[in-house]
Image: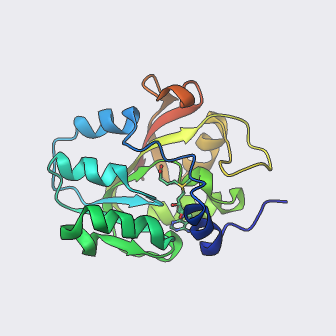
Amino acid sequence: MTKKMNKEYWEERYKSNEIGWDVGEITTPLKEYIDQIENKRLKILIPGAGNGHEFDYLIEKGFTNITVIDIAEQPLETLKKRNPKYIKNFIQGDFFDFDKTFDLIIEQTFFCALNPKMRTKYVTQMHSILEKNGKIAGVLFDFPLTEVGPPFGGSKEEYINLFSKKFNLKTLESAYNSIKPRKDRELFFIFEKK
Ligand SMILES: C[S@@+](CC[C@H](N)C(=O)[O-])C[C@H]1O[C@@H](n2cnc3c(N)ncnc32)[C@H](O)[C@@H]1O
């Protein structure tokens, strides 16, 4: 049976420093994707951002409208300390209750951190908080889905089935620029809201 992964669960993971997903900096697939975006005024959301290395990178690159949401307090406090100017951009809350809209949503190890039963709800929520032609982009794991997780796996086929009703799947391919521990284990994707 899948464990209950509520706010307390995530707070505890941060408290006990069991955060193996956090590589301490932005990963190459996201970095290289961000590097080619020209419009720095896009409204960007990073859900389940954890320590939010992507936030720092986006700020460094001159993006002006970035929101972070995470259910856990501790990583947001860390982000606030590093970025005191942007305290208002950091929201502690449940992604599934959020109702602002965005042009671009960045995904990395958030989808795989959720109970797999939430996947359809994730797709619906992503769709509803994107502007017209808005996009989700990032990485999804490419290893078999089992009861063991997080992270919970998935496959290209599963993602096609899950997302194609509500999104145009612009890109969904094995990432060529993964960090070493994730090599051949993740798919880079760009899905545009239908
Ligand atoms: C595996 S961590 C990934 C963190 C970050 N994306 C990274 O790559 O370092 C998953 C994150 O999602 C957050 N989270 C889990 N469920 C959430 C929810 N329903 N709403 C918002 N954040 C959530 C957790 O607190 C945790 O920070």
Furthest residue in direction front, as rendered:
16
Tell me if 134 is positioned left or right of 51 in this view. Answer: left
Q: Is residue 6 above or below residue 34?
A: below
Residue at figure coordinates x 46%, y 59% from the top left: 50
Residue at figure coordinates x 16%, y 59% from the top left: 64
- Residue 129 seen in render: no
Residue at figure coordinates x 34%, y 49% from the top left: 54
Tell me if 125 is positioned left or right of 129 in this view. Answer: right
Q: Is residue 173 above or below residue 82?
A: above
Q: Quadrant of residue 47?
A: bottom left
**Where residue 155 appears, x then y in whole percent?**
65, 36
**Where residue 24 appears, x then y in whole percent?**
41, 44
**Where residue 136 appears, x then y in whole percent?**
41, 50
**Where residue 67 appears, x then y in whole percent?**
31, 65
In which quadrant of the rendered image does the N terminus lie? bottom right
Q: How many marks?
A: 0
- Residue 37 seen in render: yes
Q: Nearer the viewer, residue 42 or 170?
A: 42
Furthest residue in direction right, as rendered:
1
Which color scheme is applied? rainbow
Residue at figure coordinates x 49%, y 69% from the top left: 95
